[in-house]
Amino acid sequence: MNIKFLLDENMPYALIGFLEKRGFSVEHLKKIGMGGIKNGEVYKFAEKKKMWIITRDADFQSYYRFISHDIRGIILVKLTITKTSNLLKTMETVLERYKDKLSKKHLIIVEDEIIRIY
């Protein structure tokens, strides 16, 4: 299965190469000229392209809104240390431990001490 990620505009470009090296397809909203679009448009784009959304935007943690869209899933990153190196290290852990969760629709909330999966 080819897993595709849509990176919200608040995600660093370094995450593109990080994910591509692991065999994932990746698009970044800014790189495709869609920076500044509303969250509803992000959902629509992800639905159309059958993609997971990776974001730092807490608006994406609404479970009701999540289940009402036909997207592959969401990874919401809520780390207090926002340095790119910390994000990449955390994403490495998430992918190592929970890659099997990417085959089904999930809302994954990544925090400093806990990863919640719905």
Image (spheres, grey):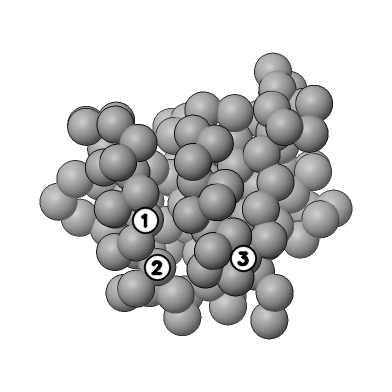
CA neighbours of label 2 inside 10 A, class few (<14), some (14 to 19), many (20+): some
The reply to whether residue 67 is visible in this rendering is no
Nearer to the camera, 54 or 71: 54
Query: Three-letter amino acid code at disc 3?
Result: Phe
Question: Which residue in the protein does label 3 denote?
Answer: 24
Question: Which residue in the protein does label 1 denote?
Answer: 91
> Residue sitting at 81 percent across and 55 percent down?
49
Image position, residue 4 (x, y; %): 67, 61
Question: Which residue in the protein does label 2 denote?
Answer: 95
> Residue sitting at 34 percent across and 73 percent down?
96
Q: Secondary structure at mark 3?
A: loop
Q: Is residue 59 left or right of residue 83?
A: right
Q: Quadrant of residue 97?
A: bottom left
> Residue sitting at 44 percent across and 75 percent down?
99
Image position, residue 106 (x, y; %): 51, 64
Q: Is residue 87 left or right of residue 9?
A: left
Task: Measure the alpha-carbon separation of dots 1 and 3.
Answer: 13 Å
Nearer to the camera, 54 or 38: 54
